[in-house]
Amino acid sequence: MNQRLRRLLAAGSAAACAFASVAGCSNDDKPAAPPARPAEPGRFASSGPGSVNTYWIRAPEGLIVVDTLRTPDDARKAVAEIRKTGEPVAAILLTHSHPDHVGGAGAFHEAFPEAPVYASKSTDRTMREDRRGFYPLARSANKDFPAELTYADRTFEDGALLRVGGLRLETATFAHGESDTADVYYRPDTGDLFAGDLATGKVTPALIEGASCGWLQILDQLSGRFSEARTIYPGHGAAGPARALIDEQRRYLRAFRALVRPAVAPDSPDGRTVGGGEQKSIIAELDRAYPGHPPVADLPTIAQENVKAVARELAAEDPAKTPAACADTLREGAGGLLAPVSAYVAAVNGRDLDALAGAFAADAELVDVGRRFRGRAAIRDWARAEVIGGTLTVLRVAENRPGYQRLLVRFAPGGRGGFDAFYAFTVDGSSITEAELTYAN
């Protein structure tokens, strides 16, 4: 490089720097530091058995607490940890009505009286009515459970957008699953999803409400509704990648149902009732398949109660009407649809955008006559604009092999008329990873 060229390049660099001074150009040419990512939520987990989490989110106007533990004593221990931050508490959020998440609300309110307590109207009503009698039961089982509860003083409509502590939080309320109602809170700037007990990692869940099928359907809705979520902070156990925790919860519930179903078959040894021997066999198999999964409740017989509740649920189900999300295994062959494919078809015809998006993996790709849509969020936008409101009829399964199905379908936009097309789906586990839609000539 000659001397004249060096001078020209240096002059050009200086001119560019002067022109771009507003962007922070400097002689040392150091790159600007990336913006700091918000701090991860703080966590306190009560001691076992039945360990339960409370979290605190760092917000511009203070801390936002999520859930309040089982007893006032547990709550006071968490309060001591929160006070070490030196920050005020701006709000307290409740995820659902179960005793282990609301029993410490009074202690939190006493410690932070200026902080409003939030819950959806549905969850607040469930707490106040307590139709299942959970709170008297909790008092009889644990002398430290409070004689009186502290309820929300700020309630919101299902799915409301909250602005608390200087943060914007998206919410969703689900019904008839792990609990009668469940509120989740999503922080879109970080991808943090506080999902209560809907998706927990490596714990034995409470199935005592006998709504495992509803819970499975909620998991599909949850993954569809919050397709950009990165991390789930669960009510029990450690935080983890959102998709992984949802898939893990789904697999556990399906496996549990698959173990119990034969025991309630009419030709089983005890008919529709699960006998003592069958119950022991189911629990032993669960212990073998899921070792080291501590219970979410301080109930010594939680495994037995779970089996009884799911047995009652399955005995009352009509297998012909069981939703695809609740299938014990992915159905293959014999003209049946793979479970995620069936879920997609049902979501189209049910006009359920959340369930449709939830049938796809977070990084799935869909090709619609040459147009590519990558990621669950893009597929959701495509479906909102072009699919929801139409009807989809499966005419036949044109190709069927493990993890792959190609269907001949008739799609009627707006529910009228329609055209024939081939829909090819590639499935991995419980999710569609690839889909290609082409016209049938």
Image: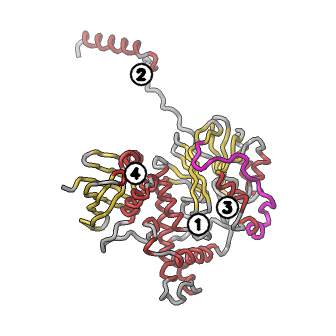
What amino acid does circle 3 point to? His
Which span is picked out in magenta? 137-161
Quadrant where the N terminus lies? top left
Q: Nearer the viewer, residue 237 or 406?
A: 406
- Could you say where residue 334 lies in the image, as x and y percent from the top left? 30, 74
Principal secondary structure, stretch drawn in magenta: loop
Q: Measure the alpha-carbon separation of dots 4 and 1.
A: 34 Å
Mark 1 and mark 4 in contact (Cβ < 8 Å)? Answer: no
Which residue, as the protein is rendered here, is positioned at the far front? 416
Identify the residue at image location x=45%, y=67%: 323
Disc 3 to disc 2: CB gap under 8 Å: no
Q: Earlier in the sequence, mark 3 or mark 2?
A: 2
Q: Is residue 67 magenta?
A: no
Q: Which residue is mark 4?
A: 388
Which corner quadrant of the image does residue 57 belong to? top right
> Where residue 103 appears, x then y in whole percent?
73, 58
Secondary structure beneath disc 4?
Answer: loop
Sequence-wise first label, 2 or 4: 2
Kindly report the distance in space between the C-alpha atoms of the residues bearing marks 2 and 1. 55 Å
CA separation, marks 2 and 4? 51 Å
- Helix, strand or loop at disc 3? loop
Residue 4 in the image: state x and y as whole percent. 25, 9
How far apart in space, not on screen, are marks 3 and 1 (Cα)?
A: 12 Å
Give the amino acid at mark 2. Answer: Asp
Q: What SS does tag 1 mark?
A: loop
| Rendered image: mark on residue 29 | 2
Give the left or right position of residue 199, taking residue 412 as reference: right
Q: Tell me which amino acid carries mark 4.
A: Ile
